[in-house]
Amino acid sequence: MTPYIADSAPIDAAAWQESWDRQQEAYLPDREHRLAAMLDAVAAVADTDRPRLLDLAGGTGTISLRALARFPHAEVTLVDQDPVLLAIASASLAGRAVLGTADLRTPDWQAGLPTGGFDAVLTATALHWLPADRLTTLYAEVRALLRPGGILVNADHMPDDGLPGLTKRLTAHADARRTARWAAGAALSWSDWWQRVTADPVLAAPAQRRREIYPDGHTDSAEFLPTAGWHLDALRTAGFTEVGTVWRGGPDAAVAGVR
Ligand SMILES: C[S@@+](CC[C@H](N)C(=O)[O-])C[C@H]1O[C@@H](n2cnc3c(N)ncnc32)[C@H](O)[C@@H]1O
């Protein structure tokens, strides 16, 4: 990763962070539950009040902020490649985490990370942006970054293997609820949120750089959304000694691997 150096004018970090969280919660009403489950897993493996954490594809830093609220002395590193989200993360974390730019599609994303072994690598709603073969390799790369006994937790859309039909119905209900909330103005959609960013006098510049990284804005990108079972197999293949599910909510889950 390359150390992230903030180069934009000040923004209202709290307002943008809140607006990101509301936008994400429209897709993931139980988002805070999965984040809490993730941090419970950290608490269970960390034998220190200074856990060393990596927020992988951390975006605006929601996981980092929740982690620092729960473990105020945690040593947090956040990696992402989105210049807009990193600008918000930089402003809202305000020096409490190390921020780096890296593309997880390339193996050299790890260059420049703090050494010594992380207690936990945490990631949410992000790795479905990677293709299957790259994600399998990334799991092994993450394992190598953990200290023995450390954990990876990945929360994402990952249906239960045994419930394909029910998952479809659950997803259809959730889609209908979300559409109604957008129609009522209760939350912004992904594309509406990015339009706000583009219209902002400060964030418009990083948004322009973002278009080079994500030319379609990610809105139409192919997503890789295998079942939780696929993830557990991939974690086993990557060499994790214990793998399992630490949280489930409808079609989403958080899987964990212990090194
Ligand atoms: C939906 S956001 C989730 C962000 C954050 N984890 C959260 O829960 O709020 C997905 C994130 O994955 C990041 N991401 C996707 N592909 C990436 C890649 N190849 N390298 C680095 N970051 C990536 C995006 O930039 C974005 O910040």
Image (cartoon, rainbow, N blue to C red):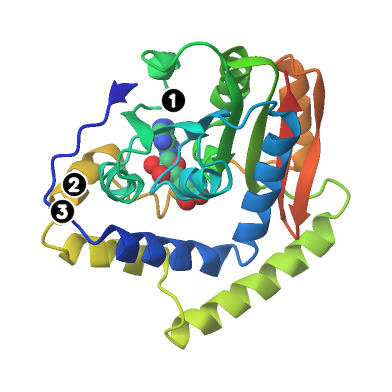
Residue 17 vs residue 66: left or right?
Answer: left
Quarter of the image with the C terminus is top right
**Residue at x 28%, y 25% (from the top left corner):** 3
Q: Are marks 3 and 1 in contact (CB under 8 Å)?
A: no
Q: Amino acid at mark 1?
A: Arg
Q: Which residue is mark 2?
A: 206
Q: Which residue is mark 1?
A: 105
Q: Position of residue 218 (x, y in %)?
A: 39, 49
Q: Which mark is residue 10?
A: 3
Q: Nearer the viewer, residue 236 or 1?
A: 1
* Element type at mark 3: loop
**Residue at x 54%, y 37% (from the top left corner):** 127
Q: Which mark is residue 53?
A: none
- Mark-to-mark CA distance, 3 and 2: 13 Å
Badge 3 crowding class, 10 Å Cα cut-off, few under 14, some 14 to 19, many 20 or more, is: few
Q: Position of residue 6 (x, y in %)?
A: 19, 39
Residue 30 vs residue 18: left or right?
Answer: right
**Residue at x 73%, y 27% (from the top left corner):** 257
* Element type at mark 1: loop
Q: Amino acid at mark 3?
A: Pro
Quarter of the displayed picture in which ligand 1 can be seen: top left
Q: Is residue 179 above or below residue 220?
A: below
- N-term mark: 3 or 1: 3
Quarter occupied by residue 180: bottom right
- N-term mark: 3 or 2: 3
Q: Nearer the viewer, residue 222 or 152?
A: 152
Indicate if the residue with disc 1 has its beta carbon within 8 Å of ligand 1.
yes
Residue 188 vs residue 138: left or right?
Answer: left
Q: Amino acid at mark 2?
A: Pro
